[in-house]
Image (cartoon, grey):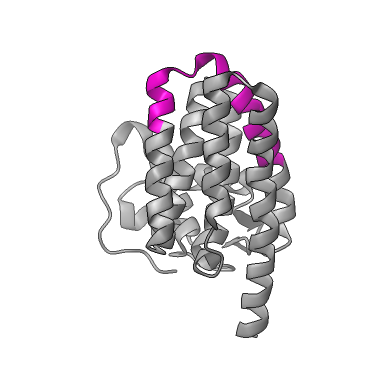
């Protein structure tokens, strides 16, 4: 398995968390590819730690759906498929809808201005066709709303689902650049926060997730057909 040569030293008190976040990042950004075998011994040796925190991190990754542990055989990165989008986007849309409702009474004028700035940067990134910067601003917009909801359970589940979706976006986002509709939906959500229009906010939030799901499925299908 490929292990990057430059890795920061492991914090002594949180080696399991460090390894978990490291492996999550490698799986999401494609350092570890679909079906890649993961050696707990190799990771532990490279990081200079025992195998225990690595194994603990792999068990969490298994529960999150990132790896497949085949007892007595090996551990491999779980492949992702276009059909996974139908398992990821609807629950994420539902969670974000609830988060938006919870965030509304907590949304300060400063937070609304931050959303406005993020959305303007998002629009400019789309105009430049800078797909990864656009993706980062899009995520920042939604992350701020989830943060304002102040619910750790929603935040945890959203973060896990986001990582799975980000993994697909890293592979296919250049073939599925979001359109101006996303900017308009963000703007509608900002206005809904300003006017305390919870119904419009929730409907727009859900649409902002489910519409791109169909667009990304089509892009992935076209890319797969072309590649195959």
Give the side of residue 39 with respect to residue 99, left or right.
left
Query: Which residue occupies 64% across, 69% down?
Result: 220
Q: Is residue 20 in view?
A: no
- Front residue of 54/89: it is 89
Image vertical order of residue 119 relative to residue 111, above or below:
below
Q: Position of residue 192 (x, y in %)?
A: 58, 27
- Quarter of the image where one finds residue 198: top right
Give the side of residue 163 with respect to residue 25, left or right.
right
- Front residue of 38/191: it is 191
- Front residue of 89/137: it is 137
Query: Which residue occupies 54% across, 70% down?
Result: 175
- Front residue of 7/93: it is 93
Give the magenta part as a residue range: 91-114
Q: Position of residue 206 (x, y in %)?
A: 68, 39
Q: Mainly helix, strand or loop, the magenta region?
A: helix
Q: Is residue 21 in view?
A: yes
Is 71 inside the magenta-drawn segment? Answer: no
Image vertical order of residue 226 relative to residue 101, above or below:
below
Q: Quadrant of the C terminus?
A: bottom right
- Quarter of the image where one finds residue 225: bottom right
Q: Position of residue 16 (x, y in %)?
A: 43, 39
Query: Which residue occupies 55% across, 67% down?
Result: 172
């Amino acid at each position: 398995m490929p292990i990057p040569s430059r890795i920061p030293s492991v914090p002594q008190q949180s080696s399991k968390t460090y390894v978990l976040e490291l492996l999550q990042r490698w799986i999401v950004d494609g350092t570890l590819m679909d079906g890649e075998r993961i050696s707990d011994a190799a990771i532990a040796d490279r990081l200079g730690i025992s195998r225990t925190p690595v194994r603990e991190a792999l068990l969490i990754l298994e529960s999150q759906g990132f790896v497949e542990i085949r007892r007595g055989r090996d551990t491999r990165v779980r492949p992702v498929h276009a059909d996974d989008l139908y398992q990821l986007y609807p629950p994420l849309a539902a969670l974000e809808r609830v988060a938006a409702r919870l965030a509304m009474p907590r949304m300060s004028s400063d937070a609304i201005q931050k959303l406005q700035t993020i959305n303007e940067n998002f629009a400019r990134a789309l105009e430049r066709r800078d797909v990864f910067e656009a993706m980062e601003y899009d995520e920042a917009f939604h992350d701020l709303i989830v943060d304002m909801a102040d619910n750790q359970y929603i935040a945890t589940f959203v973060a896990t689902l986001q990582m799975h979706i980000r993994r697909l976006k890293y592979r296919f986002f250049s073939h599925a650049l979001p359109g101006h509709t996303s900017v308009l939906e963000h703007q509608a959500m900002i206005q809904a926060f300003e006017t305390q229009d919870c119904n419009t906010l929730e409907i727009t939030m859900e649409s902002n997730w489910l519409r791109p799901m169909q667009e990304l499925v089509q892009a992935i299908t076209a890319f797969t057909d072309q590649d195959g």
